Amino acid sequence: MRVPIAFSSLLLASSLLLLAGCAKEPTPVGAKLIPAGDLIHLDTATYRSVRSYSQSNITQTATSPRVLIGSVDNLQSWGLIRFSYLPDSIASKQFVSAELNLRTIYHFGDSAAPISFTVHQILLNWMTDSLTIDSLKAPGFYKQSACGSYSAALLGDTISISIPLDTAAIRAWGTSSDSVITNFGLLLKPTNSRVIKGFGSFTISDAAMLPTLLLRFRDAAGDIDTLIEKTGTHRFVTTGPNPLWPSDSTHLYVMNGTSSRGYVEFDVSALPIHAAIHKAVLELTPDTRLSLTNSFTVDSLEAFFTGDDGATLTYISASGGPVQSGDSRVYQISLGSFVQRWLRGAKVPRIALAGYTEQAAIDLFAFHGTSTNAAFRPKLTVIYSLIQ
């Protein structure tokens, strides 16, 4: 059946009208019909820090993939390694030898400098992250006479080393069924001066880099048995940061390993209390003359929210790193959620700054602080709108 020409024309015109009505892009004419009050008006505010300082912090190194041992100038790092309890099956066997095997994976300082350290039996329990160098040096913490030692004129970053140990020190640990705990592990105390070496720890993912205790025994028949232990706990503890840093308001010192954290405060009271924060960016200008990094450095920072009582709330955090801003290199961290919390009742607009690998390395990031050239002071740029 043929469709009348007039009806066909009407159908075609209706289809074109529908297609025109479904256009994806709005026209300028339609945009002008939106009331001005329905549009978001963005404002930008820029603040410079009103206070900045540095403060020491005890580093949580129990999860570090490295145990750091050595000295660079006045900075020392001591290692602690505690293997799991020895099995009861060795209690009646005669010790033949004991070895501590470690694998290098890191250095800080002069990689070509000699490395040396002594190994001591630890006499007190240390299953805590509150250890300091003073704790380690306290009388009775470790046996003064060494049960092993290591030295090398040159030690690369991918080398396995073996340290013979006095079997009497290992025998003193007892075995797993003993009612009194005596296995407190080994202290590795540096005796060098120009390099800190990192060795694989118990939390490293590569099994070939784990600390290993190799024990050999002679059984009743005179045969040699071997026991290999690869599980345990570890820490490294460093000397504290420079004691002059907390009083230096011209710089912020963020140092991994030791550790030192930087704190920055802003006065954002001029922001409307009901503002919606769309973006807030912290900018820090580094002072490269004072910074100390190397090829192992992870060039990033973490920012933590701080409570009104001064506590650092590590579960509220953000991270960032260096970017090129015009002719300058600055570190930027997005802190929109921080500023929003400040407007919702937090009394002290303060940020704590740490190195991203604070628990696993030794790096120093130095930044210009509040008492310096205004162009270099920490800057916070906030983009916001008023809630309608």
Image (tube, rainbow, N blue to C red):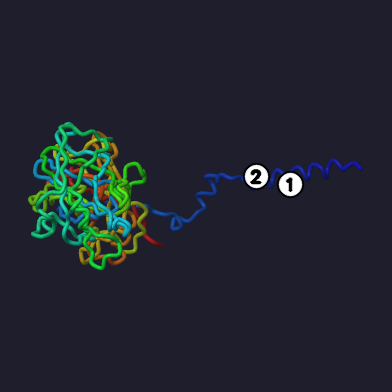
Farthest residue, direction right: 1
Q: In the structure shown, which secondary structural element does the residue marked by tag 1 occupy?
A: helix
Q: Please tell me which residue lies in front, 9 or 94.
A: 94
What x and y, as percent, mark residue 49? Answer: 19, 52
- Disc 2 residue type? Ala
Q: Report the disc number at residue 20.
A: 2
Dividing the picture into quarters, in which one does residue 305 lie?
Answer: bottom left
Residue drawn at x 20%, y 43% as measured from the top left: 164
Secondary structure found at label 2: helix
Label 1 crowd (10 A; few <14 / some 14-19 / many >=20): few
Judged left or right of residue 8, residue 363 is: left
Q: Which residue is mark 1?
A: 14
| Percent x, y of residue 75 | 12, 45
Give the mark, 2 or 1, whose residue is nearer the N terminus. 1
Amino acid type for the residue under numbered disc 1: Ser
Which quarter of the figure has residue 312? bottom left
Query: Depth check: 144 or 306 in front?
Result: 144
Image quadrant containing the N terminus: top right
Left or right: 53 as drawn, with respect to 203 = left
